[in-house]
Image (cartoon, coloured by chain):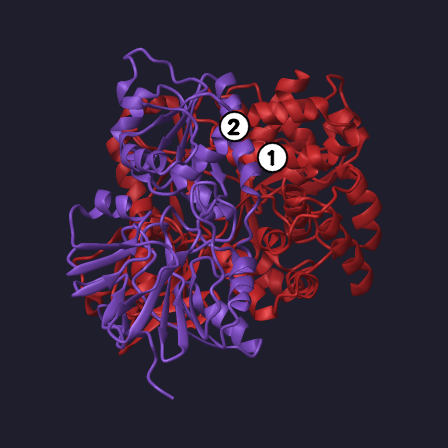
Amino acid sequence: MKRFATLYQRLDRSTATLDKRAALVAYFREAPARDAAWALWLLAGNKIGGARARLAGSRELRTWIAEVSGTPDWLVDASYDQVGDLAETLALLLDDPHEAAEEMSLADWIESRLLPVANSSELERRDVVVEAWYTLPFAERFLFNKLLTGALRVGVSRGLVQQALAELSGVDIALIAQRMLGAWTPSPDFLAGLLSPDAQPGDTASPFPFFLASPLEQPADALGDIREWLLEWKWDGIRLQLIRRNGEVALWSRGEERLDGRFPEIEAAAQALPEDAVIDGELLVWTDGDAPQPFTALQTRIQRLKPGAKTLAQTPARLLVYDLLELAGEDMRRLPLAERRAHVAGLVGRLDDRRIALSPEVVAQDWADAAMLRHEARARGVEGLMLKRRSSVYQHGRKRGDWWKWKVDPLTIDAVLIYAQAGHGRRSTLHTDYTFGVWDGEALVPVAKAYSGLSDAEILELDRWIRQHTRERFGPVRSVAAEQVFELAFEAVNLSKRHKSGVAVRFPRILRWRKDKPPHEADQLDTLKALTR
Amino acid sequence: MHADLVQLRPEGLYCPAGDFHIDPWRPVPRAVITHGHSDHARSGMGTYHVTESGLPILLWRLGQQDYHAHPYGEAFTLGAARVSLHPAGHVLGSAQVRIEVDGEVWVAGGDYKRQPDPTCEPFEVVPCDVFITEATFGLPIYRWPDTAEVARDILEWRDECAAGGEAAIVYCYALGKAQRLLAEIGALDDQPVWLHGAMDPGVDIYRAAGAQLAPTRRVADAAKDESFAGRLVIAPPSAAGSPWLRRFRRAQQGFASGWMRIRGNRRRRNYDRGFVISDHADWPDLLRTVQETGARRIIATHGDTDALVRVLRDMGVDAGAFRTEFGGEET
């Protein structure tokens, strides 16, 4: 446990990626395989025992710490409000043990203490947790609590862990990333396979890591001759990998979730593909007409494990095909995009089923022409244009240079700050989660939550203002005087029955603090409704 | 039953019987000053009653004024009040103000701490009827580690910095904290500590008062090509992000403060390291002190008074709060 706590501390203290990577490499080199496997599991953002294992709920932990530290419940809550991190609060409320207990490894803590009591009675789980609190010194107690409460949040991305493992093992990072996709168990065997230069049995059965486009930051004409670029619409759906190998079909979302069973119409169509293939595409709900349904329609489908006939008829799914990663067992990713696309065009052409169809090429004479088309994007129900170099190979992760997303300029409104809440992690002592409202007659109705877009100096200034202009407090949330106006940007507005305002905005963020605007000049709800599609 | 001996007025805490204010934030004719931090000692008062050991600090901070310096524990009369000053353990010369009128005793604790501090007189428990306590760190998450342990952490970090060719810059307040750090570090290590110019007057005053501090050198006197790799440098928080830092080609930065107990505070300010060392009482010491004074009534000032007041009330103590304008020095 001590070794992992030390790693955590090094990762937490450093803001430099190189230092973090060095710390990871050193840890994975020195740690026993059982510990290293669990460390990898946790750093990759997984929970102990998976999503369904109940170790300790937030309410339980607060009750237990109140009991063992002799702190009233309300004071535990007040402390938590101040700290903003439950694992840390729990650790701070106790003094260190007088004598350090005998060191127990990370794997032993998890396998012989925590996992055996997962989903058991509260009393059994409490015993294990409280014993740990009484025996572990601060740094380890804090980390132990992090294991209970979920995410480590230590500023380490999956990609950084994979870089460290690649550096340590000499195995190509793309292969490591691929081996870590989907379900795996944190065991020494898995770790050995992950870091092995030899082909592993799973290597052929799993999805490939997605290649992601970067936002276009320079003028498009800086990209050179437009004929070297493939232009496509940027669809607002779910990026998906369709795998058909040996006649078996699997659907993987970019979030590395298997979607099997949720989209039976796509699976059925894939069965009819003339050859085995791995296809990269975008899942959309598309009834009839020229444009897909908004993203909210797709959301209703994702939640249905086994959609009924009515759902399938009302919200039929389609896969728009972008790319071909594997054909008849052969890895196509090193071929240039133009060739991959020719292959996949032939493949889905022969299938001749609109449920799996090519995402059409957008033809533009020059960049000015492309810019005009981009302006039509919103009317077409897409987010903008994708620009892909025709000679590009299929890489993994977000690599700049060959694939760009050129999104349409966002919609904007002026809205009034109505609620604020303290953030988490490094923002835990500041109010950084904001709720904004627009006018519906005399009242402000909440329409968007936003967390990003202000500079550090503005966040500090606004935090001070919020503290001085709080009207009411509801736990960690404060309602504030309706005085501050902000310009918000968002990608789209959809009608929604789940929201009080009747609309849902996509990807809201703060563009500017409009100190020049009085609150009554903020936008009306009707203005927002007029932007829906 | 007569009026409260100390009342909250727009100018600050006021004692009607003695016609004086304690650490007022607006100009008044007669002020009793608990210590030299800028949120407690302000200019513009007619006369200043201070401790003898605190006088040099007041002279540094406020210049020549009409001072009346008193030894600890020696009573003097202001109006109908018998007043004496008692060590608060906060910084050199810091005081609690004991006020006695017709046999009733009130003590205004000012800023205080109970942890050992080699650079100032230790806190003295003064029995009283009413105790006015600070509550800067008024939540149970604030519990201070042993200061010598923290000093060892700082030296260990300095040596890590040495290995990476970096300077180790610790930010802390120029009055009190800096000298306490120098004393704690000097007890463990004899390498010189480098000082930002803002640290000079305070360090000189403490040395003149007999404090045993680590050997120090001034950054301003360093040779142009001086390498600060592996050197410990002490600077005020205002130096963070300033052009002054440019002379340290490579450096890690740490902050020494009770607020560093919370990880989010360190991360938000982007310090590499936070060192938990405070000149205020932590939560267990607030509760202990309130009990040891034997006071039947407690009034909390500056900081998180809500939680402390509620806990004391739940324990059956008559507790309330004054909304003061203190708390500028360590926030």
Both marks 2 and 1 on one chain:
no
Task: Give the letter of the red chain.
Answer: A
Circles 2 and 1: CB atoms closer than 8 Å? no
**Of labels 2 and 1, the one closer to you:** 2
The image position of residue A45, as x and y in percent, is: 63, 42
Residue B225, compared with residue A91, is above or below; it is above
How many numbered marks appear? 2
Please name whichever residue, B70 or A309, is drawn nearer the observer in this view of the structure: B70
| Chain B drawing hue | purple
Residue A327, compared with residue A406, is above or below; it is above
Asked whether the viewer can see residue A224, the reply is: no
- The tag on residue B155 is 2
Element on which disc 2 rests: helix
**Host chain of mark 1:** A
Element on which disc 1 rests: strand
Residue annotated with mark 1 = A279
The image position of residue A282, as x and y in percent, is: 53, 43
**Host chain of mark 2:** B
